[in-house]
Image (tube, rainbow, N blue to C red):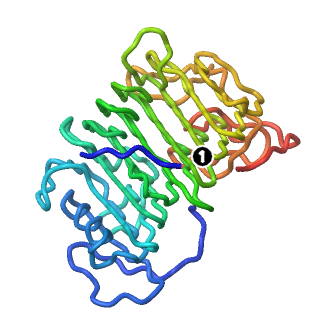
């Protein structure tokens, strides 16, 4: 599957990690994860450049730990102000971008609001591309992006030759704008064993002029997984509700426990040969691709204070403890999802335990 071309797993084998910031390691052993602890916008771009094609650590696994704070694209001077950029044409060398760390990167906050990647309303926030090796983004807020490319805030694998797995989780994507599509997020993958995965993510206040106001996901290899997300208050021009706030196109698609509500002129569109659609609150379904469905509803989520930016579920929300589809792990703020019984819809979990006798399937 080809992607649009435009111009401008959390578990695994533990490997040795060498951490660097502005000073780099001379010789890294094969199989070593190169660690970067960054605390300025320029250091973040330096780390991405060193991991990119032509960089000192290209082809190696790179883990970038970002210290809590504000990182503005306008403050990057080398090569120039603009999106935080990474491009890897090698067959090896995964990239993990992780926000929320303390000053020496020895401890991490579970709140993505602690690390703000900001486009200042001038630039796309982050543009990541990889031919083969996986890309992962977590624990950050992507905000105030502006671009004419797909993915107003975050773009992963925009080129047709970018086939790597793409994963975004524990992230907030808000208040981004593009004159193209994918106001908040564009992410794609291709090739056997590669999947596009987005979970535990809040996507709000994004605008796209040409459709897909919030998110556009493509998965030509092992498809797309989209679960435990809240997508609200995004907009796209038009007045007939025929535009899309969420667009998913993949070889197979699994969509569960999401809230997709209050998106202006935008509905939910999924185009996949095989698909599941379980326990979602979706205001307007334009195309469900004939998915196997269970537990889907269309109700007001009952957010605590959406106008004030609080998209947690209120005490009287009809979405509390409603899902039978358990995903395990933790929510956007690090609260544990229940391992038995029911869980809440969306990116935030309040229900800890409801019914120990109602086992459900984990993703």
Residue drawn 41% across the image and 59% down it:
98
Nearest the viewer among 20 and 111 is 20
Place of residue 176 in the rendered image (x, y in percent of width and height, measured from the top left): 32, 34
Identify the residue at image location x=27%, y=72%: 50
Q: Is residue 92 above or below residue 212?
A: below
Q: In this view, does 61 lie above or below 161?
A: below
Query: Does 262 sit above or below residue 58?
Result: above
Residue 61 placement (x, y as % from top left) = 43, 74
Residue 114 to residue 203: above or below: below
Q: Which residue bears the numbered disc 1? A: 224
- Kindly state the secondary structure of the residue where label 1 is placed: strand
Q: In this view, does 136 lie to the left or right of 154?
A: right
Dividing the picture into quadrants, the one containing residue 95 is bottom left
Image coords of residue 286 (percent x, y)? 59, 21
The residue shown at (26%, 43%) is 124
Front-most of residues 189 and 122? 189
Along the horizontal axis of the image, is 104 left or right of 243?
A: left
- Specify the farthest residue to the right: 357
- At 26% across and 54% down in the image, what residue appears? 84
Q: At which x and y percent is residue 44? A: 26, 61
Name the side, left or right, on which 157 lies relative to 228.
left
Please tell me how many numbered marks the rendered image carries. Answer: 1
């Amino acid at each position: 599957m080809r992607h649009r071309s435009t111009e401008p797993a959390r578990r695994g084998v533990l490997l040795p990690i060498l951490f660097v910031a502005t000073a780099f390691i001379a010789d890294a052993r094969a199989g070593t994860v190169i660690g970067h602890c960054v605390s300025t916008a320029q250091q973040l771009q330096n780390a991405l450049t060193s991991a990119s094609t032509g960089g000192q650590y290209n082809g190696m696994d790179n883990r970038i730990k970002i210290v809590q704070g504000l990182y503005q694209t306008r403050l990057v001077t080398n090569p120039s102000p603009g999106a935080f950029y990474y491009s890897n044409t090698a067959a090896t060398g995964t990239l993990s971008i992780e926000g929320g760390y303390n000053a020496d990167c020895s401890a991490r906050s579970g709140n993505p609001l602690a690390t703000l990647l900001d486009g200042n309303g001038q630039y796309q926030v982050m543009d990541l591309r990889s031919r083969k090796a996986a890309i992962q983004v977590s624990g950050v807020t992507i905000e105030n992006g502006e671009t004419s490319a797909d993915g107003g805030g975050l773009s992963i694998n925009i080129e047709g030759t970018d086939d790597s797995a793409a994963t975004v989780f524990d992230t907030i994507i808000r208040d981004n704008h593009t004159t193209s599509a994918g106001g908040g997020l564009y992410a794609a993958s291709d090739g056997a064993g590669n999947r596009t995965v987005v979970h535990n993510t809040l996507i709000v206040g994004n605008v796209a002029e040409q459709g897909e106001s919030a998110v556009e996901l493509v998965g030509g290899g092992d498809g797309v997984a989209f679960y435990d997300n809240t997508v609200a208050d995004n907009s796209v021009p038009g007045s007939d509700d025929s535009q899309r706030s969420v667009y998913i196109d993949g070889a197979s698609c699994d969509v569960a426990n999401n809230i997709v509500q209050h998106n202006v002129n935008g509905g939910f569109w999924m185009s996949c040969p095989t698909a599941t659609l379980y326990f979602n609150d979706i205001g307007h379904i334009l195309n469900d691709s004939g998915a196997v469905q269970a537990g889907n509803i269309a109700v007001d989520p009952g957010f605590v204070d959406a106008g004030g930016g609080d998209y947690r579920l209120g005490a009287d929300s009809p979405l509390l403890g409603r899902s039978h589809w358990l995903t395990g792990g933790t929510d956007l703020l690090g609260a544990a999802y229940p391992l038995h019984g029911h869980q809440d819809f969306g990116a935030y979990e309040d229900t800890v335990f409801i019914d120990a006798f109602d086992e459900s399937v984990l993703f």
